Image: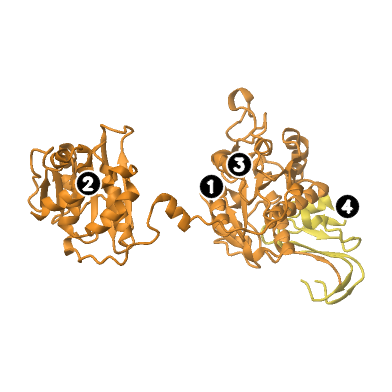
Amino acid sequence: MAKIIRKSDSFYPIYEHKSGAKDVTHYCPGCGHGVLHKLIAEALDDFQIRDRTILMSPVGCSVFAYYYFRVGNIQCSHGRAPAVATGIKRVFPESIVISYQGDGDLAAIGGNNIIQAANRGENITVFFVNNAIYGMTGGQMAPTTLVGQKTTTSPRGRSVANEGYPVAVSEMLATLKAPVYIERVALTDAKNTNKVRHAVRKALQIQIENKGFSLVEVLSACPSGWKMTPVQAKQWITDYMCKQFPLGVFRDTSAEIEPSPAVKNEFISHDLFKKLDIPDKPFRAVKSETPPVNYQNPRLKIAGFGGQGILLLGLGIAQAGMQMGYQVSWIPSYGPEMRGGTANCHVNLSNKRIGSPVVSQPSTLIAMNLPSLEKFECEVIPGGLIIYDSSLINRPPARKDVEVLGIPATKIADDLGNTRIANMVILGAYIARTSIIPRQVVVDTLPVFIKRKNLVPLNVKAVDKGIEYVSQ
Amino acid sequence: MVEKGGLEKAKVIIREDECKGCGLCIEACPVDVLFEQNVLNRMGYHPAGYKGEGCTGCGICFYQCPEPGAITVFKKGYVEEEVT
């Protein structure tokens, strides 16, 4: 049978571009991307891994890789492909995850992403296409631009004094311990192209055998950006690029590592819950009375001084709500100080999925000092609820279209021997007023979010005092 | 087009409408059997063409060509299906 070297099955037969002919790529004549695409596609065919491959498309000319490769695809934010690849690989360890990135993407904006992914030794394969410029945007200087190279943003040529030296990614990553395989190859003549082919296959083989992180840096021509003919561009790689970016293997420990099966990473385990002291399932058995309609699905803003336990109060409501089986969210907003600044947090409890965790129009405002009341009072929706600490706030809210509950929480806490549990008094008052969470659930979840366990009984006492005050 | 059946010599097919005229295959061909055609394709490029004789089926042009589908190389032997 005749051997036929032809377009790989890992390419779509028809490219569903928005514009242009559907049987050709969008790449310029002589572009290196096309060749690397072919070599990757051929390897996917030969290793029979197409059905479990997920390709990270970067930002750059190769963003359209999803039009060509017949594999799973995610188009990542600029430079973030290694982070996205990490997530995908950890959730689907049996998949083959390829991060395909250019030098503007990987070496500039995504520099830290690739360093950290390599340092963690993620079991992914990175193809790093280095053409020494930002190709897609018109040939600007990149971190990898050669010394002396003229680009649209270095018209006099890159100068070391002004722009520093080119970033040698392969050498840099080879200083890390975790990577298994790092090689720099060049898409030039037949011999070097064959080396690229072998490097692509080796890098994928390493991932298939679950050996760890591999990166292949491919020096690739950009005739348009370099303003050369394709033939000249290839010669320029040989004459100039290869001098500043020497080809070779910078790391290869693949022979020392035994192939292993893919292992699912279990992040959520009962063991983890136990370590965090969290009940491992919601107390769904707890039946609470249905809260009055105006208290259902509350959107809370909780505000006061830093140090009053504002964030902890919000966390307590969210944590107890979560144990009830509500959808919950909690986001804090505070200054850089631990104590003394202002603090507030936004909490949602809902029977439905929560769209935004930000609460700009609270249905309930809990104000624990006067500035907070003055600042947020106007935001409360008509018919909403304002709970305030009447021992610190000497004037009741001015609003007449909302419910108001004043409770001398700090005074009550002081009587219990610790002013810092005023937040728990407020928590008690809130659940008593709204019946949104039964007392028992709050009591059961207190140990989850109170770090010093010996203080739990005192906090329970404070919650009860709050409930008692409202019930009177 | 290559028909089903025995192929006595290696052969290269270039799909002219997919060729962007970059010339890399012509430059790389070790036996110099490719050339730039003096016609324009639908994209306005001068596509590469095969002189018709002398292809060894080495595949170097295929791996130099950036277009996935522009070049198909046949080594000699039995072709099981018609390829256009």
Q: Secondary structure at mark 4?
A: loop
Q: Pointer 1 indicates a residue of which chain?
A: A
Q: Residue at x 20, y 66 (%)?
A: A290
Q: Quadrant of residue B74?
A: bottom right
In this rendering, do the residues under marks 4 and 1 share a single chain? no
Name which residue type carries label 2. Met
Image marks 2 and 3: residues in contact by CB distance under 8 Å: no
For chain A, the rendered hue is orange
Where residue A470 sits in the image (x, y, percent)?
11, 53
Q: CA distance from mark 4 to mark 1?
A: 41 Å
Count of marks, rendered view: 4
Of A1 and A366, nearer the camera is A366
Q: Which residue is mark 2?
A: A424
Label 2 vs 1, first from the N-terminus: 1
The image's mark for residue B30 is 4
Q: Which residue is mark 1?
A: A80
Where residue A400 sits in the image (x, y, percent)?
7, 51
| Quadrant (top left, top right, bottom left, bottom right) of the C terminus of chain B | bottom right
**Chain seen in yellow:** B
Q: CA distance from mark 2 to mark 1?
A: 42 Å
Q: Which residue is mark 3?
A: A119
Image marks 1 and 3: residues in contact by CB distance under 8 Å: no
Name which residue type carries label 1. Arg
Q: Pointer 3 indicates a residue of which chain?
A: A
Mark 2, Cα crowd under 10 Å, few <14 / some 14-19 / many 20+, is many
